[in-house]
Structure formats: C-alpha cells, structure tokens
Image (cartoon, rainbow, N blue to C red):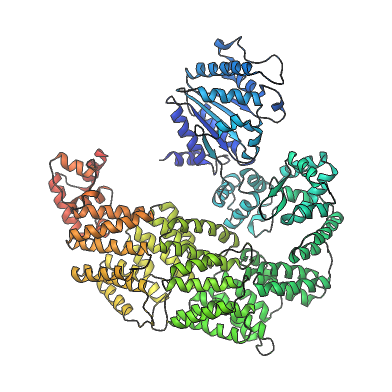
Amino acid sequence: MTAGSSIQGDMAEDSPLVGRIRVFEELLETLRTVRKGNVGTVVLTGPSGSGKTAVLNSFLEHCQTVARGIQVLSAMGDEWEAQFALAGYSQLMLTPPLRSAKAYDGGPHLPATPVAALSGDQVLNYASTLSTHLEGLQSHGSVVVAVDDVHKLDVESLRILTFVMRRLHGKRILFLLTLNPADASRIPAGVLDFLTGHQVVRIPLEPLTPQQVQEVARRLLGMDLSITAAHGLVQHTGGLPEPIVELLRELPAETWLSWFPSLPPTSRVRARVRSILNTASAGLVSVAEAASVLGTSAGLAEVSQVSGVASIMEVLDEGHRAGLLELSLDQARSSVIFVQPGSMEAIYEQIVPSRRIALHRLAAEAVELEGERLGHRVSATPVADESLAVELEAFARRQAAAGVWQDVATALFSASRLSLDLRSRNDRLLRAVDALVGSGNVAQAQMWAAAVEALPSSPLRSSVLGYLSTVSGQNDSAQTQLEMAWRTSNPQREPAAAAQVAQRLVLHGVASWNGPLITGWAERAMALTQPGTPAHIESEAIYGLGLYACGRIGEAEASYQRAFAHAAENAQKQRVQMGAGWLALRLDNAESALVNFESAAPTEYRGGSLRISLWAEAWLARTHFVLGNWDSAAATIARASVRLETSRMPLIRPLLYWTAAELWSMRGDWDRARYYVSQAAVQPGTYRAMQVPASLARARFHEARADYESALAVLQPLTELDPWTENRVSFWPWQDTYVNALVMTDQLDTADSFLTAFEGVRREREIPSDLARMAWARGRLLAAQGDPDAAREHFEAALGHLRGLNRPYLRARISFAFGQSMRRAGKRRLASSVLRAARDLYDSLGAATYVERCDRELKATGLDVGHLPDPADPVLSAASEQNVQLTAQEQAVAELVAAGATNKEAARTLFLAEKTVQYHLTRLYRKMGIRSRSELAAAFRARN
C-alpha cells in the first residue's frame, strides 16, 4: 500500500486533509529527510481559507502522536501583536519542551516587558539564543519549528527566525511556515527574498477540484453532491475549502439538488462584512453598496457616479486596509472588486429595498452596455411594466440575430415577469427557455422543464421540450416532441416559427448522424427563412455535415464556402466554424480544423452558444490528439470538462471523454483512464453521436490493456449501429480497430468478410487516413493468415498513404502492428527496424503503455541490442545463475507469465498462438529446472 492510500484510508470522516493528501505526503517526505540530519524549510502558501492552518495543525498532531522523537515549537502571527518586538519569538520560547530545558534557564530568553524595536546587536543575541535552543533540542531528537501566518509576525521575530534558518546546517530541524501571498508585502524585503529563494521548498495549496469537493461533502456530511453542484461551489468560492465547508453546513440539503444561479455568503462572511461596515466611513459604505449593485460592471467611474463619492481613491484606500475592496487595473479597464468571495453578496443583501431600487436606477444611467442598462432597470422595477417588457423583447431580437443566446434568455425572462397579460408572459417564458438551451445552459433550462410542461400545448412548447431533450441526449423524447411541433406548425402563416422547428430537427439529425435527416430538414429551414436569420445560419452551419454523411463530399465543401460568405462577424459565425472544422478534420485537413475549432471555442467576448463552444472544444481536443499535441489535448479536456459538467450537457460528454480515455490509456494512467471511460458511458437508446464515441472510449481502453476479447465485445454492435455503405458515411474511425480485435482473437474469416465489404464500398473521394487504416487492417489480417510478404506490402502502403500528413499516433499504431507481425513471421531485422520507429513515435507522445510494448517486442526479436533487458532482469538472472540460455521469445514469455499473465493474455500481447506460448513455457521450464508458473514467479520475486 502506498503512503497516499494509507493516509487516505486512515483519514477520519471530518479530516481537514480532504483534498490535501498530496501536500501532507510532501511534508512527510521532507520530515523523513530532516530526520536523517538535514535542515529543511517549507512554506505552505495560499489565500485565506485555503486550509493552510488545517494542514499545519494536522501535520503537527501527526508529529506529536504518530511520529516518535519529534519536539515541536510553534508560533502564530497576529496583526495586533505584530506591533510588539519579539511577540512571535516569545511564543517559540514559551513552547513546553523549551521550558523544561535547564541549560537555558537564566539566558536572554525574553524581554521583561514588550519593546518597540531592537538594535542589530540585540537581534543577533536573540538569534544566537534561539540557535542554541534548537541545537540542544535536536540532540535528543528531531525538531519542528512551526509558524502559522508568518506574514503577521513582528519584524524582529522574522529577522531572528530568518537569521537562524540561514545558518543552521546538518541539524535535524524542520522549519514549517504558512504564508498568504496577498500579504507578502508586509514582510521585510530581505526576509521575503529568503522565503522565496531556492533554499526553501514552497508548497502552494491549490483550489479544490469539483471531485475533491464531492469527497468533502461525502466525508463531512454524508452527502452525494452532484458534479454540477460541485462545480458551482468551486466557481462561487474559488475552490477555497473554508467557505465550501461553511456553505455545505449552512444551506439546506435541497439547495444542491438543482441548478442554482448564485449562492449566498456564509455566516462568517456576513459577520465579517457587518463588522467592517459598522466601523467604516459613510463613503466606504456608499462605495461598497454601489460596487455590489454594479457587480462585474463596477468600474471606477461607474462606482463614483452611483455612490455619489467624488474622492473615491481615498475611500478605496480605506477599503483596502479593511480587507474589503481592491482596485483591479489592467490594460482594458480599472474596476473595484471585493477581496473575499461572498462579500459582494453580503453587502447587497443588507441594502434595504428602497435604497437598492434607487441604486439600480443610478446604475442604469451609469453603465454603457444596453443589456446592463436594461438589467438595472429591471432590478429597479418590482411590478409589471409592459413598455419595459417590449424594450427587452426588441433587445432580445437583436441579440438573437447575433447569436448571443444567453443575453436573449435573460432579456426574455425579465420581459415575461414584467408582462401584463398571461399569453404574453407564457410566450416570452417559452422563448426564454428555448434561448437558454441555445446558449448551452442546459442545467438552468432543465430547472424550467416542469414549468414548460405545465403550459398549454402549442408548437413552440413542443419545440422547446424537443430541443431540451436533444441536448440532454434523450433521442426518443426529442423525436416525439419535435415531430409533434412540426405537425402542429403552420409554415405558410408562420414561416419563421416553422423554420425554427425544422432547425431543431436538423440538430436531432446530427446527433443521430443521419445524413438524409440533416439535409432534408436543413433545406426546409433555409427555404422558409432569409440568409442571415438565426434559423437559416444554424441550419446552413450543419447542412455540410449532412451532405458528407450522405457521401457527397464536394457538395459539403461548397456548402461551407457559401455558409462563410453568409455569416456575419458575430457569434453566429461560431456555428459555421464548428461545422467546417468538423468536416475538415474528417477530410484530413486537421490543421484547418484546428484553426476553426480554436476560433469557435471562445465565447467570452462575442457571446455565442456554450453548446457550440463545448462541441468545438471536444473536437479541438481530438484534433490535438490526432496531430500528436497530446499535452494540448489534455489541457483542452481539463478546461472543457469544467464547463461541460457545469452546463450539464450529456450530448457532448462521450465525445470529449473518448479522447481523454484513450489518451490516458496510452499514457498508462489506468485510474484516470477508467474514470474517463466511466464518464463517457451512456445508456441504451441515446443518440448515435453519443453511443459511438462511448464505445470507442471503452474499446481503446481494452485494446491498450491487450484485452482484445473485451474490445471486440464493445465494437461488435457498431457494425449495425454505425455502418458505412454507399449511401451512408460513418464519421468515427473504428473499423480498423474492429478488424484488429477480430484478428487478435483468431476470428480471421469474420475479419476477412467485414474488411472485404468495407474495402468494396464506393467512395466519392479517397481520404488518405481512411486508405491507411484499411491497408494496415488488411496487412494485419494477411500476416495472421500466413502471408507475410503480402502483409508487408499493405503495411508499407498504409505508411505511404500518410506521407505528407502529420499523423504521429496513427503512424505509430501502424508501425507497431507492422513490426509485431513481421516479428511473428520470423523477419526479425525488418521487425526491429519498424518497431524502433514505432517506439520513437510513441515515446514522443508520452505513450508509456506502448513504449513498454515496443520494448518487449524488440527484446523478442533478439536483435535489438539498444533495447536488450538489463542484466539484473529477475527472470534472466534466475536463468543465468543456472547457466541457462533462453531465446528472445522465451524471455518475452517468461517476463509476462512471471508477472501473472495467463497463456491467453501472453499470446494476445505478443501476437502469438496460445499453443506457441505453452510450447515456450514448456521449454523454459525444462531449461530452468522448474515445473510450474508459481515457481517461475517465485524466481522472479526472489531476484526483484
């Protein structure tokens, strides 16, 4: 068991170490080094609420209760005590172990009374005394000197401590300090230089991840927190453990069961804010209230105008000293922000209603953006106001034309609340929910599903429910609702409404990967609308994919040329870029796809749809993976997964996590790979665009583990779910993996039948990567059928098809299969050459799983001196001690079997017949004088 798993298993349910295990392990490792006679200095860094004190106290408790022979000296910085010289030093000197040390009685331990400052000589005297104390203590065992909030220590104690830390060497002393980087300016420059220098180990306490927040909820409260709620908590608190735990304890459990737009401040933050405001000047109160009303729009000029405070910098200085407000400056703007998460909400909620309304009216006059002005006017209007509702509806129409759907939803929800008559209220509500779905905010849209279902039946109601079902991955429900919406719509009288329903059916067709469905409904939607309208642009952005799915490649490319010509330079272009990138990736124009996906992914500045952005990011991760930029792929997955889980959009999850599962399987991180395989999993009856990547995630995981039976079981259903025919083109490249799994499980006739039919499908244009996949699959099959020369021709043809393309991963896959097949056929020199190339490619990708396999195959050739096993190899050592010579094949078999592989598993890994593995085992048993696998494993363990 590892140290980490031991700590994890021993943690109490309310342990403060949840999410901080790695930090604790690093401290334990440093302590082990110190106990060998090496002075160590560690600084735990993090903002207030990050858990520094909790980790420090847990570590000190461990030192005093679990570890033996450790004495602890501790001190805690305090803002009030920092005005007194030696306040921190006196805490260290009064620690119990020192009081019993007779050798130090009567020395210059402490001043008789607090002093304002010390001379340089006095600092040196006190430093010398502390050094003597520590050296005396460490002669009886290791010593830990812990200082919490070192930035709040008095200057003299800081200088004494730094003097000692710089000069102690070869002693069993660990200095452990905690520091808030935001307050580092309080520390003298010389001391700060030391604490940030190379002699000091700095361990930052990173924000908790959503998964760690889930663990906190489970351990502390026995609560199964959804990943969406966990993401919301992280976003609200900045991932700081203290406010996370406080909110989990204070809010009702039902809070976390549904989407929440915001969270209240904790009681601690409320009390802190109230305390600051009670002693604040009237100007600071006014500025803080104005900033809380303005929110993210709180620029200096706006805050000054709303608060009525002209000399705002003086007030901000007061707010800065109080730890309430800060001035944020960058190249774009200057703004007033709150120091602590939850402070803005705490101030806003204590403003009385009448003043709040007055402040929002002032804010409406101060801000520049139309949407923000309208938002403040809505907040200042507690009763129905049809004229304002009409203004909001007009704004929503303009934003819809630009594709900024979140603004559309916000405006229409407000318009619905302000409506005078019920019909207008319901119509605006339906369109607001529809816009929410369009923006990608599925979590919030699902919260409105019950309200939508309760409304009278109408084409718009059915369309909204069908749209929500589509992005939620509910295939059957979506089809039922959307077909009902179309049947009850009237294209002649209301063409725009009918076109919107048709466009929703286009999305349904993409999720189903049904070419005729996509093109048919896209043509209807475009016929009912003018170019430039939302339904027309969104249909045209997908139309090319439908043409490709029907095998009409040239028409698909021409379609996107027209779509780009029609798209304005706004958020609507995002959809065209996403669709064009999708097609470009499939046609081997991966570099062009990369540009389009990178352009389609951002939504911060031009608005747009989170759904389209996430779809683009999922394909962006895949494009990076295809191009060999695996670190970029991992970073894209990490970034997109946060937004994906927050939005609660199942339609895209399998696509993103397919790449993640394959990447970490190839890199040998099996725990992470299993996690992503589970995240990619879907229920039966979901869309084809979900089922296929979910299956590929599992298949590539099993293939990486050489479990070809399991891979085949996953891939077999795809032959019916996702066939490639003359009239239907599959998008996902699974066919070569399927043939390989058939070959590796000795189902050669089935592999031949499938591959022959696949090769015979007529294609409008040959795609190089498709040709390469077919060629290497045929090469693999021919080698297994006993025709290595023909197999070689196909493998070399496969690599030739990739000439000029940057496809390191696919080239590595082909080279590995080529080399393995040639090694089995006895062509050892050719196998060694090709396997070397495969190994280099896999190594450049960080694909540790297949680097190891290449090394095993190279050993099996018996030729590759550069990759021969180490002379200390346990199996070979066991053989050499008995003067036994094993062949390369016997060595490879011995390594696998000694590690616990069955004959079948060894055969799959080495691409051998199971009888051949048994033959090699029998020979090496006889050579080594052993009789069983257990004796072989014992020989392995004895030498390991």
Residue 337 visible in the picture:
yes
Residue found at the far top of this picture: 106
* In this picture, residue 608 sits left or right of residue 324: left
Q: Is residue 725 above or below residue 288?
A: below
Q: Is residue 559 above or below residue 911?
A: below
The answer to which image quadrant residue 568 occupies is: bottom right
Number of numbered discs visible in the structure rendering = 0
Viewer-proximal residue among 10 and 857: 857
Residue 796 on image: x %, y %: 26, 68
- Residue at screen point 34% across, 81% down: 761
> Can see residue 747?
no
Q: Residue furthest front?
A: 331
Relative height, residue 383 to residue 390 (above, below)? above
* Residue shown at the point (32%, 71%) measured from the top left: 801
The quarter of the picture where the N terminus appears is top left
Report the side of 389 relative to 625 (left or right).
Answer: right
Quadrant of the image occupied by residue 79: top right
Which percent across, then down, holds residue 163? 56, 23
Which image quadrant: the C terminus?
Answer: top left
Residue sticking out furthest to the bottom: 492
Q: Measuring from the top left, give residue 408's x and y in whole percent.
A: 70, 70
Q: Residue at x 54, y 70 (%)?
A: 473
Residue 128 place in picture, x, y as percent? 56, 16
